[in-house]
Image: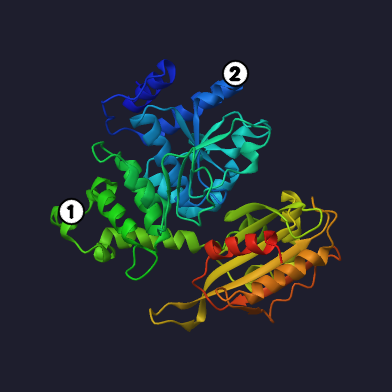
Amino acid sequence: MKSSAVRRLSTVLKLGQSPGTSLPETSSLANFLSASKEKYLSDVRATPSKGAEWTVVMGNEAGDLDSVASSIAYAWVQSEIHKKPSIPLIQIDRDDLNLRAENMYALQLAGINDPQQQLLCITDLEGVKPFPSTTFALVDHNRLGALFSSENPNANVVAVVDHHEDEHLYADSADPRKIAPAGSCASHVASLYPREAEIPRELATLLLSAIIIDTNGLVPGGKALQVDHSAALYLIPHSTLTDSISSSTLSSLPQRNPETLLGIPQIKNLSDILSAKKTDVSHLGAWDLLRRDYKEYTYTLNWHPSTPTIKAGLATVPVKLRSWGSDGKLEAEAQRWMEHQQLSVLGVLTSFRDARKFGKNGKGKHRREMAWLVRDGTDAQTLQLDDIASRLWKGLEANEELQVKIHKKMNLSKIPPTARARTYKQKNANATRKATAPLLKNIMELMG
C-alpha cells in the first residue's frame, strides 16, 4: 500500500490540484522523492513538453549537504503544501554522491537509504538537450547555470533562497527571493516552512544536519547567525533527535539561550559525527578530491578586445596540498579535470588543521592554501596564456581580505608549456570560497 505522501503526490500530479486549505500529514520523505523522480522522468521522457509542468529545485553544483537538504525541503513544501509539482535536482553525477560521507550519513538519518536511486541527479538527464523544464527554484546559489538556460528561451527562475553574495538577478520573477547572510541556506529554507503545517521528522532532521555541519555545530561565536539559531530551535523538537532528548530539555528550548544549543549532548554528538565524516577523505585520491566539492563559473573577459567567454572552477579540498598533490599528482589530475570540464582557470582551495601547531581551542591551527592553474586551448583561443595568468596573480596578491603569499614548499613545476600555475598560503583562514568566488569574478570580468 502506498504511503499517504505518495497518494497525495499522485493526486496533485494527475489532477493538477490547486492550492487548498488542507495541510499534509507527516509522511515518508523517501517515498516522496522516489515517486517524484519516477513521475518526472516518465513525463519528460514520454512527452518532453510535460517538463514545463514541473518546478525544478536545485542547489549549487558542489552538491554539499546544505544544497541537498535545501533543495529537498523546498521541493517538499512546493509539492506537498502548495500543490505545485516540484522535483529536487542534485547537480552532481549519481556516482559522485558517495564522495561525501557526511551527506550519505545525513540522508540515512532522514530515511533516504538509497540516494542513488531515490534522488534525481544530473546523470539522470544526461544528453537531454535542451533541458526539459522551464521553471526553476534556486537554493544555495542565485544564478541559473548555462546548462539549464542554453537553448531554453522560456527558462524562468521563480524562487531564490540563498546566503551567498547577491548577483542581483530575477528581481521581477522570483517570489520568494530571499538572499541574506546565514551560516546555512537550510536555515532560510526552514524559516519559510509554514508553521501551521507539520514538518516531517525526517525533513526536520535533514535540515538540522545541514545547519549543524555548516555552522560547526552552532558553536558560540562561530558561523551561526540568529537565523541559524532560530531555525535550529524550531527544528530540534520536530526531528528524530527527540527520541533521545529528555522532555525537560525539550520544554526548555523556547527559553534557552540559542548559543547554548551545542550543550545539548545529542546536538554535540551529531555535530561530531558529521564533522568527522566530512573531514575523513583519506580514501580519496587527487581526482576524487578535485571533484568532491567543486563549483563552476562562466566569465566574460570585458577587458579583452574580443570579450571572450571562459569557464573557471573552484575546488575546495579539506587536506593540505603536500599530502595529496606532491610528486606531480596535483598537476596531472588538475590538467585532466580542466580538460574534462573545458576550463581556462582552476583554483584549488584547501582548508585543514595543522597538527604541528595548536590554537586556543586545543585543536590544530586552521590553515588555508591555494593552488591556481591557467591553461590554453579552451574557448578563449584568441587569448595569450599569460594575459589571464598575470592578471590573476596580480589580483590575488593585491587582495587585502585573502592575504596570500607565495607557497615556497609547493611548487607546481610539472605542468605543460601550455599552462601556468602558482601556489599560495592564505593568511586569513576565515576567508572561504564565498570570498574567493566574487574576487575571481571581479579579476576576470572588470576593466582595468
The alpha-carbon separation of the residues under discs 2 and 1 comes to 49 Å
Q: What residue type is labelled 1?
A: Leu
Q: Which residue is drawn at 34% across and 43% down?
A: 192
Q: Contact (CB < 8 A) between labels 2 and 1?
A: no
In this view, 263 is above or below 144: below
Closer-to-camera residue (396/268): 396
Residue tagged 1: 250
Q: Position of residue 81 (x, y in %)?
A: 33, 31
Q: Position of residue 74 (x, y in %)?
A: 41, 40
Quarter of the C terminus within the rendering: bottom right
In this view, 49 is above or below 434: above
- Choose top left, top right, bottom left or bottom right for residue 398: bottom right
Say whether residue 322 is visible. Answer: yes
Mark 1 Cα within 10 Å, few/some/many (few <14, many 20+)? some
Q: Position of residue 115 (x, y in %)?
A: 49, 40
| Residue 86's disc number | none
Secondary structure of residue under mark 2:
helix
- Horizontal side of 203 relative to 392 (left or right) equals left
Quarter of the N terminus within the rendering: top left
Closer-to-camera residue (402/412): 402
Say whether residue 249 is visible. Answer: no
Q: Which amino acid does label 2 sit on?
A: Ala
Residue tagged 2: 46
Q: Earlier in the sequence, mark 2 or mark 1?
A: 2
- Choose top left, top right, bottom left or bottom right for residue 417: bottom right
Secondary structure of residue under mark 1:
helix
